[in-house]
Amino acid sequence: MTATAVLQLQEVSKKMGKRTIVDRLNLSVQRGEIFGLLGPNGAGKTTVIRMITGLLSLSQGEITICGHSVSRQFEQAIRHVGAIVENPEMYKFLSGYDNLRHYARMMRGISERRIEDTVRLVGLEERIFDKVKTYSLGMRQRLGVAQAVLHRPDLLILDEPTNGLDPAGIRELRDYLRKMADDEGVAVIVSSHLLAEMELMCDRVAIIDKGKLIGERTVKSGSGEPVTEQRFVRFEVDRPAAARQLFGQPGNASAASAAVDADSHEVEFTGTKEQIAEANARLIADGIKVYGIRPVNKTLEQTFLEMTGGGTK
Amino acid sequence: MISLLLNEHMKLFRRARIWVLYAIIFSIVCFASTAYFNSSRDLSGDDWRATVNKQIDQDHRTIANSKTTDQAKENAQRRLALNEYRLEHNIPSQSMVPSPWSTIKKSSSLTMIATLLAIIIAADIVAGEFVWGTIKLLLIRPHSRAKILLSKYLTVLTTALSMLLLQLLSSIVVNMLLYRFQYITLPDLAMDTNGHIREVNMLGATLIDYGYQSIEFLLVVSLAFMLSSVFRSSTLAVGLAMFVTLAGQIITALLTRYPWGKYWLFANTDLTIYRAGAAPEGMTMGFSLTVIVVYYALFLAVSWAAFVRRDVAI
């Protein structure tokens, strides 16, 4: 699109046999942007990442990184990329440090000093000389991040980076990616099947399903609040019919939708935090017993349609 | 390229496996050398002249006997000439004195074992990366796949040769110690077709034997490397390469009945048949060398195509 596009995919397709795994995908990621690749398992996220990193050939289309074609100028293109593809698989019989040295040798101009800085950055300095086979999944994930950022890439690709990280680690990673993007202008691509995670981490999210781009949207609102103001919950009540009536009343202050599951004692409700609390108060005020309020994860498509406001009422 | 080679060597030598293989080679050399040494313990080396004289008498009688075949007569005459040369120049036969060299020279036949061990390295070096999943992080660096493959092949070659070198050097050292450095300068005798007798340096002769052995060694190693690149599975590559190597000679024997049997690789890898004048009909040194080169080029081309051209989807 513009001169600042670090990564550009044009009409990219991947066919394996008769199956089309990725179908005419168009994407572009800018400098300083954290871009989320969201989709259920098997949607083609990893295939896209493998094509960007040159592990898979393209059946059609073109991918350019910093202006270099991945298929025709692989070495110039991949020079700008740091990545974790699926799990961060390292040489288990080597120490973490030797793993980093291994990758450092493959790139020009990475000093011992840079390796040490990177190790400190991912917080592995205490265990870096231990063999990788003794590492926990979270530590391997950190080492994976370390090898990806070692050469200060312009494009950082992390495939399911929060796998195996504890909540504190996830927050750390988030802050770190933010810093990389803001301070060093790195373009970051993160893939995940977890929507909530993406919303907290990314500037922009593309949703992929069955190899197709089904939508793209900017995540952060001006106030910095997460976009999922709309929550989806189920109330477990003693009189679901009454509850439904209550939610379905015309002139209801909340614009939220409500639905009843006929068989169970559960009533579905969508609204903001405040609206949920209000709904609860109203139920109780009407003498309806509330046994529980349960948040429900919706399918990606549902959520996405709601996010983009394209959902059916 | 240097850094790629450093990486490959680091990955190879930081694992215990390679040291186990080296230890196996060393142990086998020690074991075989000691066994030979014990069986020849009675040799004092003092009475070799008596043995030679006995053989000379025997050969004279054989030649004089009218019932002897021409072939036997010829053999007797050759031995007679050699034995007379021994007495004259004071050069005992390697087998009559406690000399380390006959065992050292024989150690080249242990190359079969080194071959099987080198297969383990060659069959794993590409496939291992796929099995571990590390291939993904290896290939997303600014190096072409061809270069990465080449670094792996060169590493396999140097490591395989280091195994052969260990076999040779440990055989020399162990036997020198066993025989207490006796007769280490003793040459062997060789007679050419014209009946001229020549003194042969034993180290040179040993190196030549190793040279002949290393042809099959390098081809098998390259075959294992190719299988590694094609199948991306260490176990399958090791298994297949070992099978082909072990069954190679049997298959050669089976194929001799067919006119195309001579195009089978293992019918051509033993070039000593030309030295001994035992070449099968229709085969020449040039023919065998051509077959070897064609197979070798094929192994490398297939390795390259399988590694550079194919998708990595693990």
Image (cartoon, coloured by chain):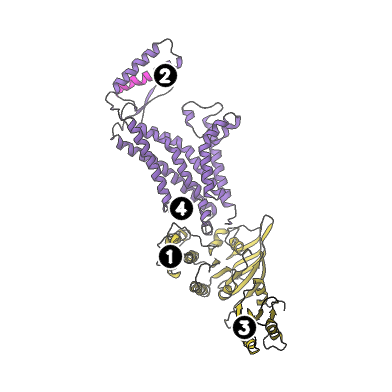
Chain colours: A yellow, B purple
Mark 4 residue crowding within 10 angstroms, few (<14) / some (14–19) / many (20+): many
The residues colored magenta run B75-92
User: What residue is at 60 percent from the left and 80 percent from the top?
Assistant: A292
Badge 2 and badge 1 both on one subunit:
no
Query: Given the current orientation, which residue lies at the most extreme left position?
Result: B46
Q: Measured along the vertical axis of the image, is residue B213 above or below residue A202?
A: above
Q: What residue type is disc 1 on?
A: Ile
Q: Is residue B91 left or right of residue A143?
A: left
The residue that mark 4 highlights is B8
Say what secondary structure mark 3 lies in: strand
Point out residue B221 in the picture as x, y percentages from the top left corner: 49, 43
- CA gap, disc 1 to disc 3? 56 Å
The residue that mark 2 highlights is B75
Point out residue B174 in the picture as x, y percentages from the top left corner: 33, 38
Q: Is residue A244 visible?
A: yes
Quick check: marks 2 and 4 in contact, CB under 8 Å? no
Q: Earlier in the sequence, mark 2 or mark 4?
A: 4
Badge 3 and badge 4 both on one subunit:
no
Pair 1/3: label in front? 3
Badge 1 and badge 4 both on one subunit:
no
Badge 1 and badge 3 both on one subunit:
yes
The residue that mark 1 highlights is A115
Quick check: marks 3 and 4 in contact, CB under 8 Å? no
Point out residue A211 in the picture as x, y percentages from the top left corner: 66, 64
Q: Quadrant of residue B60?
A: top left
Pair 3/2: label in front? 3
The residue that mark 3 highlights is A290
